Image: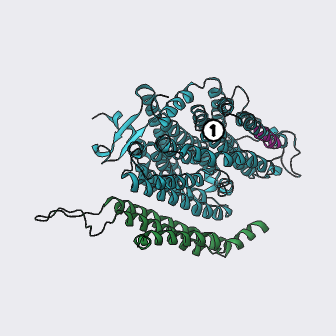
Amino acid sequence: MNLADHLPALQVAVPLLTAPLVILLRAGFLAWLTALVASLASLGLAILLTVAVLETGTQEYYVGGWEPPYGIALSVDGLSALVLLLITGASSLALAGGRQSLRLDIDNRRAPMFYGAWLIAMAGLCGIAVTGDAFNVFVFMEISSLATYILIAAGRDRRALSAVFKYLIIGTIGATFYLIGVGFIYMMTGTLNFADMALRLDDVIETRPVIIAAGFITIGLALKAAIFPLHIWLPRAYTYAPNAVTVFIAACSTKVAIYVLLRFNFTVFHGNLLGHSDLFSVFIIPLALSGILLASAIAIYQGNVKKMLAFSSVAQIGYIALAAGLASQAGLMAALLHMFNHALAKGTLFLCVLAFILTSRSAIITDLHGIGRRMPWTMAAFVLAGLSLIGVPGTAGFISKWYLIVAVMEVPGWGVPLVMAIIASSLMAVVYLWKFIEAAYYGEPPPGGDTAALEVTLPLRALIWVAALSNVYFGLFPQLPLALAQSGTGTLLGGLN
Amino acid sequence: MKLLGLFNYWVFAVLLMIGLFALISRQNLIKKIMALAIFQSAVFLFFITMSKIENGTAPIIQAGVDNQIFSNPLPQVLILTAIVVGISTTALGLAIAVRLYEEYGTIEDNEILALDRSA
């Protein structure tokens, strides 16, 4: 028995089994350390899996040795590997950088429970990425969502409670819609395995229930992924969550919902269901476009830097959805790359915001005037990640914007207007980021405020810079995300094309 | 009789809509959670209905009985899991409602929003 054969199962098992262990620990520090070690171990597993996928292709794993369609299959391809790297990377980054901030936000007494919930959330998200079974996805989705609600509500800000209640209601509606869709498909095909569904859909003569299923699944997952205008839970949840939690969930949780959306709409429906591609495009592209334009515009008017970045996330999800909605090979490439690159940029930005809040105890932009002069290192990292978010050449964001524009230009007749919308939104990103950067560098500090130099501890600063420089690294050497996106696009569209 | 034959599915659709409507229209958090429970139960009913066939029994092989008609047990197993998920969601929702009441002194959504705005 070789341990390397069990990587897909270990990816879920390690955090899931460490979680109860963490809860048993008394002291906050030990609990944090154990959670960090488990998170780093998961990152290591994700890297091993990525290497395996790049070398030998899709990794299949049959739980308990039962072959599908009877047993549950785990299947990790390039796309899953990409998402796994995002989840475990974001979790490790947020845990490593969030120690001081979490000590302020979470009662020491409750800290073990909090870190337990953190690991369960991560296990659930990893589970979604590795499984090849539609009902498994539902269960893991609810595991991760329930744990995420706890993480968001765990802070001291009471506004987080009403935000999380809204998230709970909307998230449950989304998951239930997904379940209804899975039910309809099971009715028509008699299977829950993604690959098997795709095969059996060909034989389904009465396709109307399947079209309805596609509708339920797409809308349910769009709710979870916060595709405009189904994003209403997102800004408040991101804003009032503990800062380290925001770093974690902003980088990966909506991406995982988009991952399932792509998995279902492409692996299962695309090419097997007559007329589905057109319906999908017609539904998703207008929503994505309005998200790109309106959410960016709303971000400009936010006075709270976390809320500003949250609305920017809604716009960025719009880019991903737009690229996916094109339903072409180039479009999917762009969507997968942007998932990766946006997570890099947004993770770094929220980590910088965490550092600002750690020293100045406020997320309101007017309170943060002059913070750039007091924290030059952190602010420079913020600017770097901001450039990546805008899509300046030399940063990771440029790569995915470039692929997106190339994909959009392929659309007959609509290429130029779509490119205009993307550029308009990028310019709005310049505006809202500049609003904060200007205040931070040139703004007058609030009356009575300190002006002394004020930096976070060296390890946190180093971590912020590692995150910021990864934005540049993947902008100059994008081979890894490109290879994974290529492999992911291949499996999504089926076969060799 | 086709309409009556789909009776269970009608119940599913009506319950689902009752739940969704109440979720949107009620301001009281407890009522919202109740609506969520109705909404989820409708889906449970949908899964159970689709697995049941007339005169079908549990899939147990008995000695001396041939031509037994079985109902598909898989959707029932799935729903067992979904019920557990539903209970956890309800419990967490109620816990958050309790915390909201401690912090704001009300469980009306619009009053909580008003308190947030005035603060």
Return the x and y of residue A309 as percentages of the image width and height: 71, 47
Q: Residue A432 lies in magenta, yes or no?
A: yes
Question: What residue do we see at 57% from left, 41% from top?
Answer: A90
Which chain's colour is cyan? A
* Residue A176 coordinates in the image, percent (x, y): 50, 60
Give the camera-side residue of A328 and B29.
Answer: A328
Residue B53 percent across, percent down from the top left: 31, 66
Could you tell me what secondary structure mostly forms the magenta stretch? helix
> Which is more toward the observer, B46 or A292?
B46
Q: Is residue A317 above or below residue A489?
A: below
Q: Colour scheme used in the picture? A: by chain
Categorize mark 1 by other alpha carbons within 10 Å: few (<14), some (14-19), many (20+): many
Q: Secondary structure at mark 1?
A: helix
Return the residue at label 1: A323
Q: Classify A475 as above or below A157.
A: above
**In this picture, which residue range is highlighted in magenta?**
A425-436
Q: Residue at left 67%, top 64%?
A: A158
Indicate whether A447 appears above or below A371: below
